[in-house]
Amino acid sequence: MHTLQARLLPFLIVLAVLVVPPSQAQNRDTDELGGALSSIGQQYADNYTQPITDALGANLNAGLFRTAEVGGEGIVPVIDLYVGVAGMGALTSGSQTAFRLDQDQISTDDGRTLTITYPDEDLPTVFGEETSPGQAIISDNDPLTPNETVDLPPGLLNTSIAPLAVPQIGAGTVLGTDAQVRFLPETSVSDYGSVSLFGLSVRHSLSQYIPLLPVNLAVQGTWQSLSLSGSDDSINSGEIVDASGWALNAQVSKSVPVAPITFYGGLQYEQFGVDVGYTFQTSAGTSTVSFEQDASNNVRALAGVSVTLAVIQLNVDYALASNNTVSAGVGITL
Protein backbone atom coordinates (compact mmCIF):
# COMPACT_ATOMS: atom_id res chain seq x y z
CA MET A 1 0.00 0.00 0.00
CA HIS A 2 1.21 3.47 -0.87
CA THR A 3 2.52 5.67 1.94
CA LEU A 4 3.28 9.39 1.83
CA GLN A 5 5.18 11.36 4.44
CA ALA A 6 3.77 14.76 3.51
CA ARG A 7 5.66 17.85 4.58
CA LEU A 8 2.59 19.80 3.56
CA LEU A 9 0.41 17.91 6.04
CA PRO A 10 1.46 19.82 9.19
CA PHE A 11 0.73 23.08 7.35
CA LEU A 12 -2.89 22.13 6.80
CA ILE A 13 -3.29 20.76 10.30
CA VAL A 14 -1.97 23.95 11.88
CA LEU A 15 -4.12 26.10 9.62
CA ALA A 16 -7.13 23.90 10.37
CA VAL A 17 -6.63 24.71 14.06
CA LEU A 18 -6.21 28.41 13.24
CA VAL A 19 -9.18 28.82 10.91
CA VAL A 20 -11.77 26.37 12.21
CA PRO A 21 -13.82 27.14 15.33
CA PRO A 22 -12.64 24.97 18.23
CA SER A 23 -15.80 22.88 18.28
CA GLN A 24 -15.11 21.75 14.71
CA ALA A 25 -11.39 21.28 15.14
CA GLN A 26 -11.79 19.13 18.22
CA ASN A 27 -14.19 16.82 16.37
CA ARG A 28 -11.50 16.00 13.85
CA ASP A 29 -9.61 12.74 14.21
CA THR A 30 -5.88 13.42 13.88
CA ASP A 31 -5.57 10.13 12.01
CA GLU A 32 -8.07 11.46 9.48
CA LEU A 33 -6.05 14.66 9.13
CA GLY A 34 -2.89 12.58 8.95
CA GLY A 35 -4.28 10.77 5.92
CA ALA A 36 -5.69 13.86 4.22
CA LEU A 37 -2.72 14.40 1.93
CA SER A 38 -1.32 10.89 1.92
CA SER A 39 -2.26 10.12 -1.66
CA ILE A 40 -1.85 13.22 -3.79
CA GLY A 41 0.79 14.69 -6.08
CA GLN A 42 1.99 18.25 -6.52
CA GLN A 43 -0.77 19.51 -8.84
CA TYR A 44 -3.45 18.01 -6.61
CA ALA A 45 -1.86 19.53 -3.49
CA ASP A 46 -1.65 22.91 -5.21
CA ASN A 47 -5.35 22.94 -6.12
CA TYR A 48 -6.41 21.37 -2.82
CA THR A 49 -4.69 23.93 -0.59
CA GLN A 50 -5.12 27.16 -2.61
CA PRO A 51 -8.28 28.24 -0.70
CA ILE A 52 -6.35 28.02 2.58
CA THR A 53 -3.60 30.27 1.22
CA ASP A 54 -6.24 32.75 0.00
CA ALA A 55 -7.97 32.82 3.39
CA LEU A 56 -4.73 33.12 5.34
CA GLY A 57 -3.49 36.00 3.17
CA ALA A 58 -6.82 37.79 3.46
CA ASN A 59 -6.81 37.44 7.24
CA LEU A 60 -3.22 38.40 7.97
CA ASN A 61 -3.53 41.60 5.93
CA ALA A 62 -6.71 42.63 7.80
CA GLY A 63 -7.07 44.57 11.05
CA LEU A 64 -3.90 46.63 10.54
CA PHE A 65 -5.36 49.95 11.78
CA ARG A 66 -8.29 51.38 13.74
CA THR A 67 -7.94 55.08 12.94
CA ALA A 68 -5.84 57.31 10.71
CA GLU A 69 -4.92 59.54 13.66
CA VAL A 70 -1.25 59.18 14.54
CA GLY A 71 -0.72 60.42 18.09
CA GLY A 72 -3.40 61.72 20.40
CA GLU A 73 -5.33 58.47 20.92
CA GLY A 74 -4.04 57.79 24.42
CA ILE A 75 -4.49 59.57 27.69
CA VAL A 76 -1.02 61.14 27.33
CA PRO A 77 -0.87 63.67 24.45
CA VAL A 78 1.13 62.56 21.35
CA ILE A 79 2.31 59.40 23.14
CA ASP A 80 0.40 56.24 22.37
CA LEU A 81 0.61 52.65 23.52
CA TYR A 82 -1.83 50.03 22.26
CA VAL A 83 -1.99 46.41 23.41
CA GLY A 84 -4.74 44.25 21.97
CA VAL A 85 -5.95 41.40 19.82
CA ALA A 86 -7.24 41.57 16.26
CA GLY A 87 -9.74 38.96 15.14
CA MET A 88 -10.20 38.50 11.39
CA GLY A 89 -12.51 36.32 9.34
CA ALA A 90 -12.19 35.68 5.61
CA LEU A 91 -15.52 34.81 3.99
CA THR A 92 -15.27 31.53 2.10
CA SER A 93 -18.42 31.83 -0.03
CA GLY A 94 -16.31 32.74 -3.08
CA SER A 95 -13.59 30.16 -2.44
CA GLN A 96 -13.01 27.31 -4.85
CA THR A 97 -14.57 24.09 -3.55
CA ALA A 98 -13.75 21.67 -6.39
CA PHE A 99 -11.41 21.18 -9.32
CA ARG A 100 -10.68 18.71 -12.11
CA LEU A 101 -7.39 16.89 -12.62
CA ASP A 102 -6.59 13.84 -14.73
CA GLN A 103 -3.03 12.91 -13.75
CA ASP A 104 0.08 13.87 -11.81
CA GLN A 105 3.59 12.71 -12.57
CA ILE A 106 6.22 12.38 -9.85
CA SER A 107 9.94 11.86 -10.55
CA THR A 108 11.55 9.81 -7.79
CA ASP A 109 15.01 10.46 -6.43
CA ASP A 110 16.33 7.32 -8.14
CA GLY A 111 15.10 8.42 -11.57
CA ARG A 112 11.74 6.64 -11.80
CA THR A 113 8.59 8.36 -13.04
CA LEU A 114 5.36 7.62 -11.22
CA THR A 115 1.98 8.45 -12.73
CA ILE A 116 -1.01 9.20 -10.47
CA THR A 117 -4.38 8.84 -12.22
CA TYR A 118 -7.38 10.51 -10.55
CA PRO A 119 -11.11 9.81 -10.95
CA ASP A 120 -12.90 11.56 -13.80
CA GLU A 121 -15.06 13.73 -11.53
CA ASP A 122 -14.97 16.87 -9.41
CA LEU A 123 -12.26 16.68 -6.73
CA PRO A 124 -12.79 18.63 -3.48
CA THR A 125 -10.50 21.35 -2.23
CA VAL A 126 -9.89 21.74 1.49
CA PHE A 127 -13.18 23.74 1.59
CA GLY A 128 -15.03 21.18 -0.58
CA GLU A 129 -17.30 18.19 -0.01
CA GLU A 130 -16.43 16.25 3.12
CA THR A 131 -16.59 12.90 1.33
CA SER A 132 -13.73 11.24 -0.51
CA PRO A 133 -13.96 11.42 -4.32
CA GLY A 134 -12.72 7.81 -4.53
CA GLN A 135 -9.33 6.32 -5.26
CA ALA A 136 -6.29 7.24 -7.32
CA ILE A 137 -4.07 4.73 -9.12
CA ILE A 138 -0.29 5.03 -8.88
CA SER A 139 1.65 3.29 -11.64
CA ASP A 140 5.32 2.86 -12.43
CA ASN A 141 6.93 2.80 -15.88
CA ASP A 142 8.29 -0.60 -14.93
CA PRO A 143 5.68 -3.15 -16.13
CA LEU A 144 6.86 -5.58 -13.45
CA THR A 145 5.84 -3.17 -10.67
CA PRO A 146 2.16 -3.59 -9.71
CA ASN A 147 -0.12 -0.57 -9.54
CA GLU A 148 -1.08 0.88 -6.16
CA THR A 149 -4.49 2.33 -5.24
CA VAL A 150 -4.94 5.02 -2.59
CA ASP A 151 -7.93 6.82 -1.08
CA LEU A 152 -8.17 10.50 -1.95
CA PRO A 153 -8.77 13.11 0.79
CA PRO A 154 -12.14 14.77 1.34
CA GLY A 155 -12.60 18.43 2.14
CA LEU A 156 -11.51 19.21 5.69
CA LEU A 157 -13.03 22.58 6.61
CA ASN A 158 -16.78 23.09 6.45
CA THR A 159 -17.01 26.74 7.42
CA SER A 160 -18.52 29.90 5.91
CA ILE A 161 -15.91 32.11 7.56
CA ALA A 162 -12.27 31.28 8.23
CA PRO A 163 -11.29 33.11 11.45
CA LEU A 164 -7.86 34.01 12.80
CA ALA A 165 -6.78 35.91 15.93
CA VAL A 166 -3.46 37.76 16.22
CA PRO A 167 -2.02 39.67 19.23
CA GLN A 168 -0.58 43.09 18.39
CA ILE A 169 1.21 45.95 20.14
CA GLY A 170 1.47 49.52 18.85
CA ALA A 171 3.63 52.42 20.03
CA GLY A 172 4.36 55.99 18.92
CA THR A 173 4.82 58.67 17.96
CA VAL A 174 8.11 60.02 16.63
CA LEU A 175 7.84 62.81 14.06
CA GLY A 176 4.31 61.75 13.22
CA THR A 177 5.25 58.09 12.90
CA ASP A 178 4.17 55.06 14.92
CA ALA A 179 4.79 51.30 14.70
CA GLN A 180 2.83 48.14 15.37
CA VAL A 181 4.15 44.62 16.00
CA ARG A 182 2.31 41.32 15.59
CA PHE A 183 3.94 38.36 17.29
CA LEU A 184 3.00 34.74 17.85
CA PRO A 185 5.80 32.75 19.53
CA GLU A 186 6.61 29.28 18.28
CA THR A 187 3.59 27.22 19.28
CA SER A 188 3.40 23.45 19.09
CA VAL A 189 0.30 21.83 17.60
CA SER A 190 -0.03 18.25 18.82
CA ASP A 191 2.59 16.03 17.15
CA TYR A 192 2.48 17.84 13.84
CA GLY A 193 4.93 20.68 14.33
CA SER A 194 5.04 24.29 15.43
CA VAL A 195 3.97 27.62 13.95
CA SER A 196 5.30 31.14 14.54
CA LEU A 197 4.33 34.58 13.24
CA PHE A 198 5.97 38.00 13.15
CA GLY A 199 4.72 41.22 11.60
CA LEU A 200 5.79 44.86 11.61
CA SER A 201 3.80 47.91 10.50
CA VAL A 202 5.08 51.48 10.25
CA ARG A 203 2.61 54.35 9.79
CA HIS A 204 3.17 58.03 9.03
CA SER A 205 0.73 60.91 9.40
CA LEU A 206 -0.05 63.06 6.36
CA SER A 207 -2.42 65.31 8.29
CA GLN A 208 0.47 67.04 10.03
CA TYR A 209 1.45 68.63 6.71
CA ILE A 210 -2.05 70.00 5.96
CA PRO A 211 -3.25 72.58 8.53
CA LEU A 212 -6.96 72.70 9.39
CA LEU A 213 -7.68 69.45 7.53
CA PRO A 214 -11.10 68.19 8.76
CA VAL A 215 -10.06 64.52 8.62
CA ASN A 216 -6.99 62.50 9.55
CA LEU A 217 -4.86 61.02 6.78
CA ALA A 218 -2.01 58.50 7.05
CA VAL A 219 -0.08 55.92 5.06
CA GLN A 220 1.13 52.57 6.38
CA GLY A 221 3.46 49.79 5.27
CA THR A 222 3.34 46.26 6.71
CA TRP A 223 5.46 43.11 6.39
CA GLN A 224 4.50 39.75 7.94
CA SER A 225 6.06 36.30 8.00
CA LEU A 226 4.69 32.90 9.07
CA SER A 227 6.88 29.84 9.55
CA LEU A 228 5.97 26.22 10.16
CA SER A 229 8.38 23.51 11.34
CA GLY A 230 7.84 19.79 11.72
CA SER A 231 8.00 18.03 15.07
CA ASP A 232 11.39 16.86 16.28
CA ASP A 233 10.55 13.19 15.88
CA SER A 234 9.15 13.66 12.37
CA ILE A 235 10.94 12.59 9.21
CA ASN A 236 10.27 16.16 8.08
CA SER A 237 11.62 18.08 11.05
CA GLY A 238 12.80 21.63 10.43
CA GLU A 239 11.06 24.37 8.45
CA ILE A 240 8.27 23.11 6.22
CA VAL A 241 6.39 26.25 5.20
CA ASP A 242 7.75 29.75 4.65
CA ALA A 243 4.96 32.28 4.10
CA SER A 244 5.31 36.04 3.91
CA GLY A 245 3.48 39.08 2.63
CA TRP A 246 3.38 42.85 2.60
CA ALA A 247 0.74 45.56 2.39
CA LEU A 248 0.66 49.29 1.65
CA ASN A 249 -2.39 51.36 2.50
CA ALA A 250 -3.77 54.89 2.64
CA GLN A 251 -6.02 55.66 5.61
CA VAL A 252 -8.64 58.28 6.43
CA SER A 253 -10.66 58.77 9.61
CA LYS A 254 -13.03 61.26 11.21
CA SER A 255 -13.87 61.45 14.92
CA VAL A 256 -17.30 62.50 16.19
CA PRO A 257 -16.78 65.60 18.40
CA VAL A 258 -19.53 64.79 20.92
CA ALA A 259 -18.91 61.03 21.24
CA PRO A 260 -15.90 58.68 21.55
CA ILE A 261 -16.56 57.32 18.04
CA THR A 262 -14.26 57.33 15.02
CA PHE A 263 -15.20 56.32 11.50
CA TYR A 264 -12.30 55.08 9.37
CA GLY A 265 -11.55 53.61 5.97
CA GLY A 266 -8.78 52.96 3.52
CA LEU A 267 -7.46 51.50 0.30
CA GLN A 268 -4.78 48.80 0.45
CA TYR A 269 -2.50 47.02 -2.01
CA GLU A 270 -1.14 43.71 -0.77
CA GLN A 271 0.63 40.48 -1.66
CA PHE A 272 0.99 37.21 0.24
CA GLY A 273 2.83 34.07 -0.86
CA VAL A 274 3.54 30.59 0.49
CA ASP A 275 6.45 28.25 -0.25
CA VAL A 276 5.61 24.61 0.48
CA GLY A 277 7.66 21.42 0.28
CA TYR A 278 6.86 17.79 1.05
CA THR A 279 8.43 14.36 0.68
CA PHE A 280 6.49 11.90 -1.45
CA GLN A 281 7.40 8.30 -0.59
CA THR A 282 6.13 5.05 -2.14
CA SER A 283 7.37 1.50 -2.45
CA ALA A 284 8.77 2.54 -5.84
CA GLY A 285 10.86 5.40 -4.46
CA THR A 286 10.98 8.79 -2.79
CA SER A 287 10.64 12.29 -4.22
CA THR A 288 10.98 15.78 -2.74
CA VAL A 289 8.33 18.11 -4.10
CA SER A 290 7.97 21.87 -3.67
CA PHE A 291 5.70 24.57 -5.03
CA GLU A 292 4.70 28.20 -4.49
CA GLN A 293 1.29 29.77 -4.05
CA ASP A 294 0.08 33.39 -4.08
CA ALA A 295 -3.06 34.52 -2.26
CA SER A 296 -5.79 35.93 -4.49
CA ASN A 297 -6.16 39.27 -2.67
CA ASN A 298 -4.22 42.17 -4.18
CA VAL A 299 -6.42 45.22 -3.56
CA ARG A 300 -8.95 45.84 -0.80
CA ALA A 301 -11.20 48.73 0.23
CA LEU A 302 -12.38 48.84 3.81
CA ALA A 303 -14.57 50.88 6.14
CA GLY A 304 -15.12 50.61 9.87
CA VAL A 305 -15.85 52.25 13.19
CA SER A 306 -14.01 52.34 16.50
CA VAL A 307 -15.27 53.26 19.97
CA THR A 308 -13.04 54.27 22.86
CA LEU A 309 -14.39 53.85 26.41
CA ALA A 310 -11.84 55.20 28.89
CA VAL A 311 -8.77 53.10 28.03
CA ILE A 312 -10.65 50.35 26.19
CA GLN A 313 -10.84 50.60 22.41
CA LEU A 314 -13.18 48.47 20.29
CA ASN A 315 -13.32 48.44 16.51
CA VAL A 316 -14.91 46.57 13.63
CA ASP A 317 -14.53 46.91 9.86
CA TYR A 318 -15.42 45.20 6.60
CA ALA A 319 -13.17 44.87 3.55
CA LEU A 320 -14.12 44.27 -0.07
CA ALA A 321 -11.56 42.19 -2.00
CA SER A 322 -11.22 38.87 -3.81
CA ASN A 323 -11.78 37.35 -0.37
CA ASN A 324 -14.05 39.71 1.59
CA THR A 325 -12.96 40.01 5.20
CA VAL A 326 -14.52 41.18 8.46
CA SER A 327 -12.19 42.35 11.22
CA ALA A 328 -12.74 43.26 14.87
CA GLY A 329 -10.34 44.30 17.60
CA VAL A 330 -10.22 44.96 21.30
CA GLY A 331 -7.34 46.59 23.14
CA ILE A 332 -6.07 48.95 25.78
CA THR A 333 -4.81 52.35 24.70
CA LEU A 334 -2.65 54.45 27.02
Image (cartoon, rainbow, N blue to C red):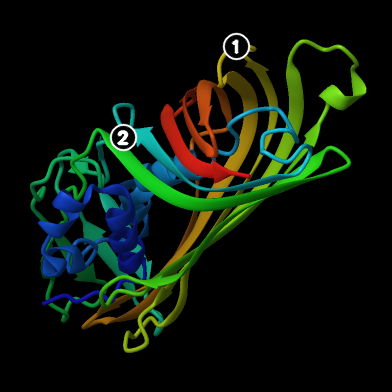
Q: Mark 2 is on which residue type?
A: Gln
17 lies left or right of 308: left
User: Considering depth in this image, is 211 or 105 the residue closer to the camera?
Assistant: 211
Name the residue located 51 percent from the left edge and 21 percent from the top edge.
305
Q: Is residue 226 visible?
A: no
**Location of residue 235 (image quadrant):** bottom left
Residue sitting farthest toward the bottom: 233
Quarter holding the N terminus is bottom left
Location of the C terminus by quadrant is top right
Q: Which residue is mark 1?
A: 258
How far apart, in angstroms, are the residues tagged by discs 2 and 1? 46 Å
Q: Residue at x 83, y 23 (%)?
A: 207
Q: Position of residue 114 (x, y in %)?
A: 29, 69
Foreground of the two, 43 or 245 = 245
Q: Are marks 2 and 1 in contact (CB under 8 Å)?
A: no
**Residue 270's x, y, as percent?**
61, 37
Q: Which amino acid, by three-letter code, is at mark 1?
A: Val
Asked if 226 appears above or below 263 in the picture, the reply is below
Residue beneath the point at 12% across and 71% down: 148
In the rendered view, does 314 fall on the left or right side of 40? right
**Mark 2 lies on residue:** 96
Q: Badge 1, how many Cα within 10 Å: few under 14, some, many 20+?
A: few
- In the depicted structure, whether residue 8 falls above or below residue 85: below
Q: Is residue 48 left or right of residue 295?
A: left
Q: Nearer the viewer, residue 203 or 130?
A: 203
Residue 106 drawn at (x, y percent) = 35, 67
Q: In percent of the image, x 31 and y 33: which residue is there?
A: 92
- Residue 273: in sight, yes or no? yes
Q: Quadrant of residue 151?
A: bottom left
How many marks are shown on the rendered structure? Answer: 2
Image spot of residue 171 (x, y percent): 70, 49
Seen in the picture, residue 81 relative to 93 is either above or below; the reply is: below
